[in-house]
Image: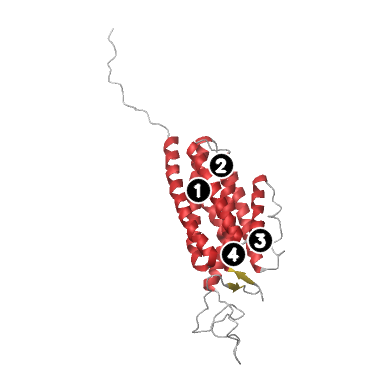
């Protein structure tokens, strides 16, 4: 089930890779006479001049998209968008679990997920209100409405919106597949599978938060630092409850010792 959460971060990982492996256009260093590109800048093939180092992005910086002149991606917005979708998915899965879980501890955990992740969504909405409005379409996946997923990828001209469109599409697919898989389980088996998925999901979220901190700035960086503590708490509780559910669901072993009582002699 780790896959369901990690796939929602594919687009963010791509942006981070571009931030570290690609170069950022530096308008203060124009190409000189006879130079096809300035020192430290990318040429049309995305390469860097021999002996020069690529310019690394600063926290919150906008990075250029290869092959798309004039289009850039705001790292803060890209990170906020990925986190918005991750929190949306957690709320949706928790609501899904509350209606099917039997173990009281699992139900309590699901309720905590709803409350804590909705609080995180409120903070992220202040940072990226436009993306938050678009992210609300993820909840439609619960009822089978897939209009948002069918939206053409290239409909929005802005590069940042294209990245978010990809993130949203992947998150919708992850949520639908996870609900489909969990929906085949019942009773203690559902409780165990949901809690197992939550262990994997929160490991993925913790990695996402830690990996994105160096690229975030301002209020978003503070939100990420606070969220890391909450996610660690969720992970610890998920591990404990998953263990309890597994032990409770294990079949009891009966003694197979042969009887030592001698049969009565008639």
The earlier-in-sequence mark between 2 and 3 is 2
The earlier-in-sequence mark between 1 and 4 is 4
Q: Is residue 89 left or right of residue 213?
A: right
Instruction: Identify the residue position indicated by label 1 in the image.
Output: 198
Describe the element under mark 1 as helix, strand or loop: helix
The earlier-in-sequence mark between 4 and 3 is 4
Q: Are discs 2 and 4 less than 8 Å apart at CB?
A: no
Q: Are discs 1 and 3 less than 8 Å apart at CB?
A: no
Please state, as top left, top right, bottom left or bottom right, where the C terminus lies in the image: top left
Q: Is residue 189 left or right of residue 77?
A: left
Percent of width and height locating residue 109: 50, 43
Label 2 vs label 3: CA separation?
A: 29 Å
- Residue 97's tag is 2
Residue 141 or residue 250, whichever sits in front: 141
Q: Quadrant of residue 38?
A: bottom right
The earlier-in-sequence mark between 2 and 4 is 4
Nearer the camera: disc 2 or disc 3: 3
Label 4 vs label 3: CA separation?
A: 12 Å
Label 1 vs label 3: CA separation?
A: 28 Å
The earlier-in-sequence mark between 1 and 3 is 3
- Who's the residue at 54% across and 85% down the image? 39
Label 2 vs label 4: CA separation?
A: 29 Å
Q: Is residue 165 visible?
A: no
- Residue 85's tag is none
- Who's the residue at 49% across and 67% down the image? 214
Residue 173 or residue 207, whichever sits in front: 207
- Residue 78's tag is 4
Instruction: Identify the residue position indicated by label 3 in the image.
Output: 130
Percent of width and height locating residue 98: 56, 40
């Amino acid at each position: 089930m780790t896959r369901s959460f990690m796939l929602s971060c594919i687009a963010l990982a791509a942006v981070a890779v571009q931030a570290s492996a690609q170069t950022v256009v530096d308008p203060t260093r124009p190409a000189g006479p006879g130079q096809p590109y300035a020192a430290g800048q990318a040429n049309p093939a995305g390469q860097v001049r021999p002996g020069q180092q690529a310019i690394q992005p600063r926290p919150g910086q906008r990075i250029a998209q290869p092959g798309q002149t004039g289009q850039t991606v705001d790292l803060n917005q890209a990170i906020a968008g990925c986190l918005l979708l991750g929190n949306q998915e957690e709320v949706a899965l928790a609501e899904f679990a509350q209606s099917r879980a039997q173990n009281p501890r699992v139900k309590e955990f699901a309720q905590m997920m709803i409350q804590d992740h909705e609080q995180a969504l409120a903070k992220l909405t202040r940072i990226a209100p436009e993306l938050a409005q678009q992210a609300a379409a993820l909840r439609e996946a619960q009822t089978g409405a897939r209009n948002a997923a069918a939206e053409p990828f290239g409909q929005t001209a802005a590069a940042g919106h294209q990245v978010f469109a990809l993130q949203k599409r992947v998150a919708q697919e992850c949520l639908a597949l996870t609900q489909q898989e969990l929906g085949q389980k019942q009773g203690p088996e559902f409780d165990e599978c949901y809690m197992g998925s939550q262990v994997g999901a929160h490991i993925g979220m913790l990695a996402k938060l830690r990996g994105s901190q160096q690229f975030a700035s301002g209020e978003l960086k503070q939100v990420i630092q606070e969220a890391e503590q909450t996610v660690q708490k969720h992970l610890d509780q998920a591990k404990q409850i998953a263990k309890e559910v597994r032990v409770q669901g294990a079949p009891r072993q009966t003694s197979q010792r042969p009887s030592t009582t001698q049969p009565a002699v008639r």
